[in-house]
Image (cartoon, grey):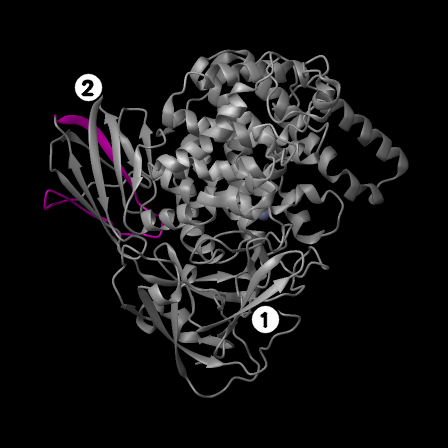
Amino acid sequence: METFWCFNFRLYGAENFLNFRFFMSHKLLVSVLAISLFTSFKPVTPETVENSPVATNAYVAPVYTPLPLGAIKPKGWLQNQLQIMRNGTTGHLDEVYPKVKNENGWLGGKGDNWEETPYWLDGAVPLAYLLQDKTLQAKVLKYINWTLDNQRPSGYFGPITKDEREKGIKVTAENCEQGEDWWPKMVMLKVIRQYYTATQDPRVIPFFNKYFNYQLQALKKCPVGKWTEWAESRGTDNEMLVQWLYGITKNPFLLELAGLIEAQSFAWSTWLGNRNWVIGAATQQNDEHWMRRHGVNVAMAIKAPAINYQRTQDKKYLTALQTGFTDLMTLHGLPMGIFSSDEDLHGNDPTQGTELCTIVETMFSLEEIIGITGDLRYADALERMTFNALPTQTTDDYNAKQYFQIANQVQVKRGVFNFSLPFEREMNNVYGMRSGYTCCLANMHQGWTKFAQHLWYGTSDQGIIAVAYSPNQLKANVGKSNTEVTINEITNYPFEDLITFEISTKNSANFPLQLRVPAWCQNPVVTLNGQSINPQPSGQIITINRTWKNKDKVTLQLPMTVTTSNWGRNSRTVERGPLVYALKLEEKWEKGTDEKEGDYWNVFPKSAWNYGLLQDIVKEPQKNLQVKNTKPVANNFVWNLANAPIEITASAKKIPDWQIVNSVAPQPVTDRTGIYRGTVEPTVEKITLVPYGCTKVRIVAFPVVPN
Ligand SMILES: [Zn+2]
């Protein structure tokens, strides 16, 4: 009880001190400050524990274990998506992007020695092994080899530092200040961890171990935030990797190190559990502590409570995770499944933007959260952002991207829009390779690749679980007999509701096969070898535990019904299963060139976009929306208008006064019942909606008009 009280008090003191100071007398202020300081030095929570020993039995093994890279082979449309990336920037960034191409610091040169090269590798490594592409494997191996081979005797690693070059010394824990930023190393460790699961390269574990020994000594003199606030705001990734190694070696010093990094980094678990942080982010959009509201930092930080739970077994972190994620999506959430981030959290108005890095980092955070907690609500969230927010933000060839996408994106062009940053560039919304900031150009490769890699996980009873669906082939060793089985998952999900699993195995094998039931699906139907079986889902999981034989076949049908959901400023979105639907608008693409940021594209709609949905659709969506499968999903499927396999027809009326102001379409004001009461054109028109991910210009958050 006392612990809880102190914990709360610390939150109050640390985060809201500034807000409250104006309301306090000086005397009261001093006493609050004193108590606050006192409690913040008291080791009552893992955030405040620095060097106190951590009980080694506090570590919780993941509920679901990620499978080694290479176990899952993408098929169908997903394989095509990855092949496009291999032929585009993911496979060739080092040839087309001077910053990575020239004198790369991660190959010993004087060029990029910070985040962009590791960012690229963080997607290129999984791609190389998912596609079993020898050329790309050889390419990424150069950077991994250089990094492993050039670890300093002290354990320090990474590009040669300025002092090392100029003074001919090597970084040690004693002279750690001659090292450089902790942050890009966190990304490189993520890269090497993936490489290790694919290859079991014996150099990797000693490399990690040596570096973490170095870190434990060096952090006392050169804390996480010594060089950049980026490292301080992203320490969770460092902890995640330390705890991954602990899961393998069980060496107690690793838990001490993870606790130390947590203590020196931003207190995300506290903030996510403390509702004042997210409310403040919705209302105070200035430059004070903006790193705490920067969307990419938040995307990475969402997993912080899960990482702390893994180290401590303290369930309060699971509560903080749920509170934080729900609050974030309530106050800043957008219909396509992601929160606003342009560059900071910016509320839930459908005119706000989201950075591409935010999407891919949130996806990765959710993949980690699902493994650690086994909570499949986060898999629903993962599918929603993957199948809706992600595809629209890159071009068909994966060579150009938007820095910020907008939910109701009625045009793509240069301009200031509703973004909190930055005014002078005006290149944040266009599609370009080097437009906006280039972090996304380097970081966007981890989205699809890691999603493919996390379709399946292992379970603690030697079974497997499908947590997200897409066409693929899985090879895994299962059951007490550790039998190798292959499962072909045949489906065009998310565009169809039927998923078939065909099992091939030389020897029969007893193991549980688990299937996630999305929260939107009320009546899943399962068959086994043609016979209907109706296993009762436990929560969101169907388990089929049996002795599996060659050619066994399971089908899972997840019937999808049309519904509408409520979003910012009383807008409504049509959704069906994992997909949200947006107004189909034929596109006019216009090329431009910026002196500094290169070639880019604007996209304009060829027809009107200012429609409101009829009230009847909200009342009875299934009766008033017509769903049509318009074309099969081809194996060379690309997320664009020409390929959109499903259309929904809806009745709508034009709102003549709904027009572009400052490049965006400000949401029309509704009354309390959610109905727009201004002038509406009397003619009812049939409009066509297509999957959001297939659109570049669109309305997805509709006003509602009287019938
Ligand atoms: Zn970015």
Question: Does 548 sit left or right of 707 as displayed?
Answer: left
Label 2, residues with CA under 10 Å away: few <14, some 14-19, many ≥20? few
Q: Name the spot of residue 401 as percent of width and height, x first.
A: 52, 55
Residue at 53% in and 12% down: 55
Foreground residue, 700 or 180? 180
Q: Are marks 2 and 1 in contact (CB under 8 Å)?
A: no
- As shown in the figure, which amino acid type bears the numbered disc 1? Ala
Confirm whether the magenta stretch covers residue 515. yes
**In the rendered view, would you say 507 is above or below 541?**
above
Q: Residue at x 64, y 21 (%)?
A: 44
Indicate whether residue 234 is drawn in magenta.
no
Answer left or right for 23 relative to 705.
right
Within 8 Å: ligand 1 and the Cβ of disc 2?
no
User: Mark 1 Cα within 10 Å, few/some/many (few <14, many 20+)?
Assistant: many
- Mark carried by residue 665: 1
Q: Quadrant of the N terminus?
A: top right
Query: If you read the primary sequence from the N terminus, does the residue marked by circle 2 or circle 1 appear first?
Result: 2
- Pick the quarter of the image with the C terminus: bottom left
Q: Secondary structure at mark 1?
A: loop
Viewer-proximal residue among 27 and 101: 101
**Rounded to the nearest whole Å, what is the CA distance between mark 2 and mark 1?**
60 Å
Q: Secondary structure at mark 2?
A: loop
The residue where tag 2 is placed is: 481
* Residue interval drawn in magenta: 507-533
Residue 510 on image: x %, y %:
17, 26
Q: Position of residue 205 (x, y in %)?
A: 46, 17
- Residue 440 versus residue 505: which sits nearer the camera? 440
